[in-house]
Every structure is written in structure tokens, then in C-alpha cells.
Image: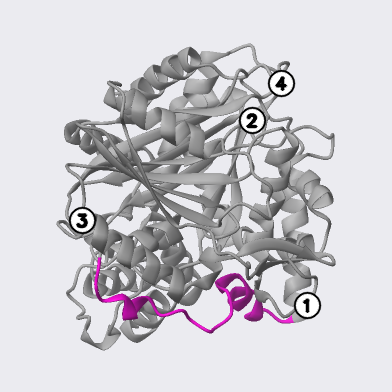
Amino acid sequence: MSDSKQDILEALNIADSFTLAMDQEIRQDGLAGSLCGFALELNQTPDIKTLQQRINKFGQQFPVALASLQQRGKRFYWCKRVTPPTLFFHHQSEAEQAEQSYQKEIISHLINDKQDREEIAPIEFHLISHSTQTTFFIRWIHPFCDARGIELILKYLCTDNTSQFEKTTVKPLVNQQLDKYSWWKKILLLIKGKRYIANIDKLESIQTFDMEQSPQKLNYATYKLTAEQTDQVAKLARKHVGLTGTSLYYIACLMRALDKLNPNSEGEAFCSPYAFNLRKQRALTPVIANHVCALFSQAPRDIVKNREQLFAHLKQQNKEVIKQQLDYAFLPLMWAGSWLSLEEYGKILRLSSSEKERSSFWFSDVGKLDIPEHSFPGAEITSLFHLCQVTTPPALAFLCCNYQKQLILSYNFVEPLVTAEQIETLHQLFITELLTDDD
Amino acid sequence: MKKKLRAFIFEELVFVADPKQFSDEQDLLEAGLDSMGIMRLIMFIEDEYGITLPDTEIEPDNVQTFNRLEQWILRHKNG
């Protein structure tokens, strides 16, 4: 790859840089970097020809999908490759292997695939076929796009009418939001953001898992609630946290489950960062890149021990954050961070003033996925789940989404720091918390 | 009032292909107004109209359509 600027397709935006700093942190832990996955379980083999055509069309319409991530000076760019990477792969089981283990083996390999940042393809599409199960797996690196973007790419693959996904030439949404503020307002927000973080850092974050051993690989466990359970969770979330706090209900229940899993863990408060999307709901553009900002949920351990107090605390915290614009206060910090080296930026993002990890766990609620029925080429989507790599600590990322009125939970954990047995216990505790009605 | 609400929701929170075609009786929750969006909307309303909307009243009945939103705001503005 040449060092000239002629091969540059696009610069990373401020939110992309934020995820790139995490990529660096994950790589420093000896893991594969900020790889993410979106797995769709299908009822049969899809129409591979149509699928491939649409994937190729996607690559043509969004050339960044075929690019290489390169550093030029201090900044990072998506650059043209001499040989574009392959976008579509078909894995077929040859052995008499159990369907679940075959799917898991391939997906585990893909999500733990260690490649140089410059070499790895921004996105890949994998069809995993077994005699009784077919899975369509999308793997991408986080600087390429966020989870909402992947939902849009999936919608792109599910339609012939791709003109509605035209690449917008306008600025990234993070920049658009920043442009709304005058320079003094940006400084004011930056100060607010710094104070917000300083306030969070007053309490040392709880780490549930033992971080003594070296991280080896990401593992995952997924669970699907029944429609009845999902309905019950929605009702309880509404009852305890209100219409505005579904995600907070999950966060609160997970904090309590983690506390019960290891009540003697060190630290003073559970703290979870989570991203919120700047795209309007149901908007089909922008498709690629990251358009997110971050905020935190934090609760001291004594409050976590009381369910109702915890719900009230997180709800009030969230309300204050939005009221004081602390959510957008992170944007100028992200802009400033994008000028730092990845090492410096990663340290600021992860470590509190006492040099300890700020996150107790990563959290993401993708919400309701509205992929039209019968739209996937030649097959029906029966279930789906998300995956993401995570730093150690905290070594746990919890992702959830709702598909066809069923809540799907995905625990992503780094072995051997966290074990599958611990996750099974955590899940049982979490389910109990989710479905508990105090009355 | 509805004009301001429509501008805020369609410019900041929810994408609809043609906002003019979206009636005051159409379902905003179905259109994609989510929990984070409702929280932002409430903050906008409280700032804009100088009222406090009680948490206990944040119910689908009050936020589902532009007509219901307006009625909810008016109850607190006039009360």
C-alpha cells in the first residue's frame, strides 16, 4: 500500500475513532480486536445466487466495505486495496458433526480471527451450512459501522430496492450534532463531560471476575426467552422503570445478578458504558460508519442490593443525563480524543483517575429488529444474535435484542477469565431478576 | 403546539418518508419512537412549555399520537 493520499477513500469519523481506540485496547489484551458479529439462523438454505449478487452490489455501492484501514500520520483512513478482499464465504459441514457445535466452531473461529488491522476485511458475509441448520453470519470490525448499521446492511440484502440506501454525502451524524453548537458551547459541553466522568470516577468500579489469568479467546452464550417471558419482562420493565427505561431495567437486573454471582468482588459501584445511536429511528441512512455517542449507568453496591431503589436511581440518573445534555457532552470529548494516539485515547476511555478500569461490563440493547417477514432471499430468519469482542477487564459484554416478540440475550465473555459455567449461573440469576415481580 | 412537536420528533427522533402524510392520530410508537426518544421528547416538552410531566403519567396513552401528546401537555399547562 502506498503512502500517498491518492488511495484514501474516507477518513474515520469521530465515533469510528472511538471504536478504533477500543480495537487497540482489545488487541493489547492479546485478543482479535474489535470484531463484531451478527448471526441469523435460517430455516433452510437461502437463495445463494441472489444473496451473493446483493452482497457484491453492496460492495460496489459502499467501497469502504472493501477497503483497508491505514494510518497516515496521526489519523486513520479507509484506503483502497490493490486486491479487494472476498466478501462472501460458504462453509459446509462435511463431517457428521452436531449442528450447534459446527455453527459455534465456525463463528468462534471468525470472531477470534487475529489479523493485522490493515489486513482484515472491514466486513465479511459467511453462510454456514449444516444438513439441519443454516446460519448467515456477518462479521465486521467496529470502526466500519455500528450495530444499527449492520441492521441496515441486512435490510439492504433483503430488498431489490437499494436506491433507498443511497450513500449520503452529508457529514457524519456526530459532526452534524457538533456543528449545532457554537465554539463556546462545545467548550462548555467538554467541561461538563469531564466533570461527568470525574464524578463517575469517584467510585471504584466493581469487577466481578478474577482478572489474574491471561485472556485467551472470546466465547459466547445466547439465550432466547419465550414470547410469554418477553411479554412479562416488558410489563415488569414498564412497571418498575416506566416507558422510558426498558434498557435500564436490563442493566439494573444484570447489576443485581452480577452482585449475587460474586458478592465479595472488589469495588464500590457497578458502572456500565453504553452507546446510543444518533440516527433517527427507522432511518435507512447513513448505512456505514459509526454514529453513536456514549454514556454511563452507575450504581453503588448498597443501592444495587435494593431493587426498587436501584430502578429509581438509574431512572433518575438517566433523566438527569438527558436534562443536562451530558449525553451530548461526550461528543466534544470524542472529538478531542480522536486527535490522541490510540494508546492515550484508550487509556482515557477505560481508566479512571485512579488508573482502574471504569467498566464493570459492556452493555448494548439493539432493541426491536424490524426486518420484514419473507424478505431474506430464499429463507426465513428463525432467530438471531449479536456478538462483540470486549476488553479485559471487564471481560463481559452483554448484548440484547428483540426479534419476533422474543428477547434474545447474548453474553460475550473472555476465557479463561470468565467461564461458561459462570455465565450459565449468571444467566439464571439474571432471568430470575428479570421475571421477579415483587408484589 | 403540534407544529413544534412534529418538528422536534421528525427532525430529531423518528424518520418517516413524508412527515406531512403522518396524521395527528397515527401511532408514534409504531413509527419508531423508543424509550430514549420518549425521554428526550419529555425533556424537550418540559423545557419548551415550562411544565413538569410526572413520571407516573409517562404512558403509551399520553405519548402515542400527536393529539394525545397535545392533550397531555395542555392538561399540565392549564392545570
Q: Dot 2 corresponds to which residue?
A: A394
Q: Nearer the viewer, residue B15 or A27?
A: A27
Q: Which mark is residue A47?
A: 3
| Same subunit: marks 1 and 3 | yes
At 58% across and 80% down in the image, what residue appears?
A171
- Estimate the spatial distance between the alpha carbons at disc 4 and disc 1, rounded to whole Å: 45 Å
Q: Are both tags, 4 and 1, on one chain?
A: yes
Element under disc 2:
loop
Report the chain holding disc 4.
A
Circle 2 Cα neighbour tier, 10 Å, few/some/many (<14 / 14–19 / ≥20)? many
The circle drawn on residue A214 is 4
Classify mark 1: helix, strand or loop.
helix
At label 2, the amino acid type is Pro
Q: Quadrant of the C terminus of chain A?
A: top left
Which one is earlier in the sequence, the residue at label 2 or at label 3?
A: 3
Q: Earlier in the sequence, mark 3 or mark 4?
A: 3
Q: CA distance from mark 1 to mark 3?
A: 55 Å
Q: Are marks 2 and 4 in contact (CB under 8 Å)?
A: no
Residue behind mark 1: A184
Q: Are marks 1 and 3 in contact (CB under 8 Å)?
A: no
Question: Contact, CB < 8 Å: mark 2 with mark 3?
Answer: no
Q: Is residue A251 left or right of residue A49?
A: right
| Label 2 in the same subunit as label 4 | yes
Q: Residues within 10 Å of mark 4 (few under 14, many from 20)?
A: few
Please give the range of residues in magenta.
A159-182
Q: Residue at x 42, y 34 (%)?
A: A106
Tell me how far mark 2 sits from mark 4, CA to CA: 13 Å
- For discs 1 and 3, the disc positioned in front in the rendered view: 3
